[in-house]
Image (cartoon, helix red, strand yellow):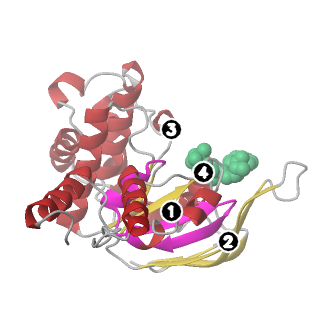
Amino acid sequence: MDIRLEKIGYTYGKGTPFEHTALHDVSLHIPYGRYIAIIGHTGSGKSTLIQLLNGLLQPTEGKMQVGNFVLPVKKQKGLEKLRQQVGLSFQYPEYQLFEESVSKDVAFGLKNMGVPQEMIASRVREALELVGLDIEEYGEKSPFALSGGQMRRVALAGVLVMKPKILILDEPTAGLDPAGHRMILDVIDRVHQEEKRTTILVTHSMEDAARYADYLYVMNEGTIWMEGTPGEVFRDPQRIRQAGLDLPEVTDFILKFNERIGRRRENMEPLPLDIFETGKLIDELARRVRKGVGKA
Ligand SMILES: Nc1ncnc2c1ncn2[C@@H]1O[C@H](COP(=O)(O)OP(=O)(O)OP(=O)(O)O)[C@@H](O)[C@H]1O
Ligand SMILES: [Mg+2]
C-alpha cells in the first residue's frame, strides 16, 4: 500500500476571503513498510498533509494515490474504506474522543466495521494494554474525565485497535511526561517492527525523528524542504536552520567535535553523522579511547 503524491496543493477556504494555501507542489513516494517522520516548524503544513492521506481533506491541486485509492474523489462514499486502512491519531486527542466510556471509545471503529462483539472486547483490552492503561481501572471512565496524557493514550488505542495498514500519528506524545513519551514511542516502534506496516510520525522532536524513523520529510512553508535518511538530512545544519529547526543534540555535538579536531589537524577520524543516541555516541568515544587516544 504505497503512497504517492504528485504536485499536491491544498488551499483552505478556497474562493472565500479566508483563502489560505497550506501546501503547494508536494510530491512524494512512500513505499509500504517504511517508518517516516515529518518534521517542520509550526504552520509548515504537517497536519494538513497527513489529513490528505486518509481522505479527511481532499487535495485542491494535483493527484494522489494511497494504495488503490486515487484522490481527489467526487463522492465521499469510498473514503470510509480508506479511513479503515489509514489510521490517524490527531494532534489534539480531545477532537477524537466522543463516547461515554473509554472502552466504548476504543471499540468504536471496530464496531462500525462489524467486528463480532467477543473479538471487540479482547482487542480493546489488548489496545489499552499496549498504551499502558488497565481496562479494569479505566474502561468505564468517561474519556473526558481523564488527564490530557491519558486522553492521548485512549485516542491512540482507538487507532491501534484497528490495526491500520498505515498508521499516522500527529505528535502522539504531546502532553506526556518523559517516561510516558518514551513508552508510547517504544510501543509504536514495537508495533512497527512486528507488523511491518507503514508508520508516519509527525513530531517537533528532532531526536525522535532521527531515532525512530528510517526516512524524514522536512516541511517548510507548505513544501517539502528536505528529505532523506536522518543521516542525510541532519548533515546539512544550515538548511535545517533555514527551515526554523534545530539539530538533534547528538548531531550538534558531533559536528562541533569534528570541526574542533579538524582545525587542530590531529590524527583523528571525524565521528560519523549517523549516530543519534547519547549511549551510542558514548560507546563510540569509549571505543576510540580504548584503542589509543583519538584513533578511529
Ligand atoms: N482550518 C483551517 N483554515 C484555514 N487555515 C488553516 C486551517 N488549518 C490550518 N490552517 C493554516 O494552514 C497552515 C498549515 O497548518 P498546519 O496545521 O498543517 O501546520 P502544522 O505544520 O501542522 O503546524 P503545527 O506544528 O503548529 O501543528 C498554517 O498556516 C495554518 O494557519
Ligand atoms: Mg499540526
Task: Work out which residue is located at the far right of the displayed protein and give it.
Answer: 17
First in sequence: mark 1 vs mark 2: 1
Q: Quadrant of the C terminus?
A: bottom left
Q: Is residue 20 left or right of residue 152?
A: right
Could you tell me how far apart the alpha carbons at marks 3 and 4 are, in whole angstroms? 17 Å
What is the x, y in percent for residue 160?
30, 51
Q: Is residue 296 left or right of residue 233?
A: left
Could you tell me how far apart the alpha carbons at marks 4 and 2 are, in whole angstroms? 32 Å
Residue 176 magenta-drawn? Answer: no
Mark 3 or 4: in front is 4
Could you tell me how far apart the alpha carbons at marks 1 and 3 are, in whole angstroms? 17 Å
What is the x, y in percent for residue 185?
29, 48
First in sequence: mark 1 vs mark 4: 4
Task: Work out which residue is located at the far left of the displayed protein and give it.
Answer: 290
Q: Residues within 10 Å of mark 1 (few under 14, many from 20)?
A: many
Q: Residues within 10 Å of mark 3 (few under 14, many from 20)?
A: some
* Residue on which the image places disc 3: 92
Stretch of the chain drawn in magenta = 204-231
* Residue on which the image places disc 2: 74
What is the x, y in percent for residue 130?
20, 44
Q: Which amino acid type corresponds to the residue marked 2 in the rendered image?
A: Lys
First in sequence: mark 3 vs mark 4: 4
Q: Is the CB–ligand 1 distance for label 2 below 8 Å?
A: no
* Residue on which the image places disc 1: 54
